[in-house]
Image (cartoon, grey):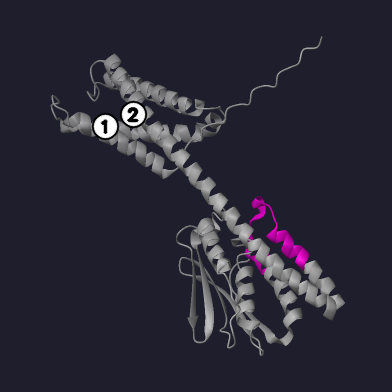
Amino acid sequence: MSVTELPASPRPPSAPLPDFCSLPVLFALVVVGALTVTLMWLAPGNDGDLRDYCIAVLFTSWLSMLLTVALCKLRPWMQRLSWMWPYAAVWLLLVLTVGASAAAVSWLDHNLTLGLSPDSTFGFVRDSVLATGLLGAGLLRYFYVVAQWQTRVAASAQAQVAALQARIRPHFLFNSMNAVATLIRVDPDAAERTVENLAELFRAALGSDQDTVGSLGDELALVDRYLEIETLRLGERLRVEREVDVPTDLPMPRLLLQPLIENAIRHGVQPSRSGGTVRLTGRVARGGVEFVVDNPLSEGPAVPGTGHGLRNVRERVRFHFGERASVEAASHDGRFVVTVFLPESARARPDRR
């Protein structure tokens, strides 16, 4: 009779630790230590010696920097622990580090007879450990709540981006297939080239979430392929001017400029019998980079649109590059102008997921 082995229970997920290498964490530790010393100094029964207060603030500030360095170096190891053990390890490190530091400072002070620490080494170490244990537990609880909130915000934002991407794809694919159907009857060779271009466009439109961020060079290549398709369909009616003076390695979400070019052709060039000129410009602006896509306002009846394309581009830009990024649209001198501004920090962190 064989014994069936039960599958091992899954390992509980690790609670995410904050970035202890960041300045906000150091600032929080310094402020909490200084506030604690201040409250103890102002407590009833304290003699209010300013010298002792300054020494205590310097001691807690030094401890804060020491603890920040230790937590920054040991965070990868502690993050490997499961469930809530990373926070337990951090709390234990805080208590042990403060206890050892208080004992070392007291021993050094007594041997040099500086009179900077209390007479009782045991009492000084005990009080330091108890205060660190209580404050550390409260501070770690705060960090845990903030980490959980950031995780939920990131998950919600990722879901919104996935929904935006899903709304972009059907519109793009529908228009592209209509172009292929038209070219097959007019020019089979051109239709074959169009299918090759569409293969690259489909790969970008239907790419996985891990491939949603590329570079400006990748995006301009997709724009060129799309413009080749539309040039075969519209002929001399479509004229394009492009002047982009921006490094091609600039991080950029895929299908960011292409939908703007598509809207410019659909709403500005296609309804006009004489066609029109679509302009794409890019330049380094103050605090970031700026892209402008403009097209002539149609003289005939405008092609009805839902506004999803421009709205989705605006929300994707805000998601990837933060609140400083912007997408503005306005009519000016008979042309419809869309301006996309990406802040300088976008180059360092193109994907915030």
Tell me which residue sits at (66%, 87%) in the image: 275
Expressed as whole percent of the image width and height from the top left, the position of residue 317 reads 53, 61
Q: Which mark is residue 116?
A: none
Q: Mark 2–mark 1 contact, CB under 8 Å? A: yes
Label 1 element class:
helix
Q: Say which amino acid is labelled 1.
A: Thr
Q: Is residue 16 magenta?
A: no
Closer-to-camera residue (108/20):
20
Residue at the bottom extreme, as displayed: 274
Magenta stretch: give its range: 198-220
Return the residue at label 2. Answer: 135
Return the residue at label 1. Answer: 36
Tell me which residue sits at (15%, 30%) in the image: 49
Query: Residue 111, relative to residue 285: is it above or below?
Result: above
Closer-to-camera residue (78/65):
78
Q: Quadrant of the N terminus?
A: top right
* Residue 156 relative to residue 126: left or right: right
Q: Is residue 199 magenta?
A: yes
